[in-house]
Image (cartoon, rainbow, N blue to C red):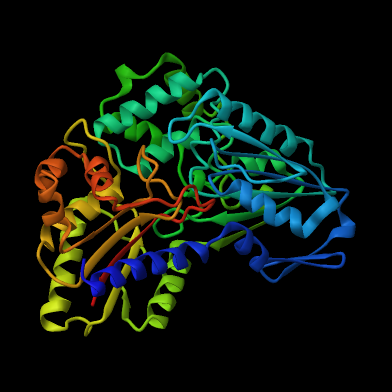
Amino acid sequence: MPRILSQLRDEAWRIFHAGVAAVDPVAAVQQHVVCQGDTLVVDGTPYDLRRYEHIYVIGAGKAGAMMSQGLEALLGERLHAGAVTVKYEHLAPVSRVTLHEAGHPIPDPAGVAGADAMMRLAHQAGERDLVICLLSGGGSALSPAPSPGITLEEKQQLTGLLLACGATINEINTLRKHFSRLKGGQLARCVAPATLITLVLSDVVGDRLDVIASGPTVPDPSTFAECHEIIARYALAERLPGSIHTHLQRGLSGDIPETPKAQDPIFARCQTVIIGSNRIALQAACAEAQALGYATLVLSSSVQGEAREIARVYAAIGREIRDGGMPLPPPACILSGGETTVTIQGAGKGGRNQEFALAAALDIAEWDGIVVLSGGTDGTDGPTDAAGAVADGQTLSRAQALGLDAGSYLKHSDSYPFFAALDDLLITGPTGTNVMDIYMVLVG
């Protein structure tokens, strides 16, 4: 491998890791939360800790353990108790917060138990107590709390029906919130009248607070009437579990209260702060690239769409820089972030970032000095132990030497074994954070 290509690949790793390090949950908490004597300052808002009898910590998400670590370091013995749910194997050393491990992306009974523990603390908090809620990517799946009379399996059946019929993520979230005891601002209802501070590590395009972890501590703009419209739109009424149908009808008739809206007094003593996001990660990655001598351009933190199609655009940008110096002269680094999707076309193994890199590899084959990296900031990509993968102009020729047909692997959504054979998987292990993905094109 030519030295210049080796250098590009090494520097792609460095730039990616700089982005991930910038959204380290411990550092993010301590950047936005400061304890000065008896005063806790959260993003500029002071709280006199002498006014509170107890401080509780609750929450859910992949970064929950490290966010808890950051808070424990700040509050020490002032922290009375905590219950935070994290993905299996996403633990960190804590002493005062109880961590509950649960399933993600498929909710499981352990998640229900974790949600119950969170709600017990929330209900325990009184008017003279302070509750700090920690939310991060995966928080919705990690805090399943079906409404009374609905089982976890029935709620999963509803989600499966919505996914199969092509409902949008916003439509799915609208129904999730109305069949939950926690989502859509209902955790804030549990906490009231205590003071509530929510610290958020965003994994959502656009950083919408009512979408991150299904918005358990913020007002919910959606309604039971919208749920009814969605079910009618996709002709699901006859296929719903009986308990779901009954709950919906009770909501429409007013027997069950709506999710809390913006004017609800339960939000009068609430503060919500985004402490980490994809934009922050991209800014840090950009700074690292500039320090390494690259001309840089951040395209967007809101990339969405089919992974293989987006990848072709990035490959085309890399070729344009290499061939004509546009939109930047080489050496250049193009960065963006977001969350692509994959329409699975086979029984293969992979994830959206690995598919992105494989599709790009096909379009930069034999182009010198172009490297494409796609990686998940949480360290996992799909059901694999890789965060993503790295590709360059020699990827296809190296694969062919091993008897691997890149086009066939892409056709069957089988990117993991392809990159594993080339030793080009991006392996970081769980990073403890989660702010979606980073996409990068480096041109030497």
The part of the image, by quadrant, that contains residue 348 is: top left
Q: Nearer the viewer, residue 148 or 75?
A: 75
Left or right for 143, reference 128 = left
Q: Nearer the viewer, residue 342 or 235?
A: 342
Left or right for 265, reference 200 = right
Which residue is painted at 44% across and 73% down in the image? 283
Q: Is residue 265 visible?
A: no
Q: Is residue 55 visible?
A: yes
Q: Whole-percent x and y of residue 143?
A: 56, 35
Quarter of the image containing the N terminus?
bottom left
Which residue is painted at 9% across and 65% down in the image? 366
Which residue is painted at 56% across and 30% down in the image? 111
Q: Nearer the viewer, residue 180 or 164?
A: 164
Which residue is painted at 57% across and 50% down in the image? 218
Q: Whole-percent x and y of residue 372?
A: 25, 63
The part of the image, by quadrant, that contains residue 286 is: bottom left
On screen, 424 above or below 298? above
Q: How many marks?
A: 0
Q: Whole-percent x and y of residue 131?
A: 74, 48
Left or right for 216, reference 208 = right
Q: Whole-percent x and y of residue 291?
A: 42, 82
Quarter of the image containing the C terminus?
bottom left
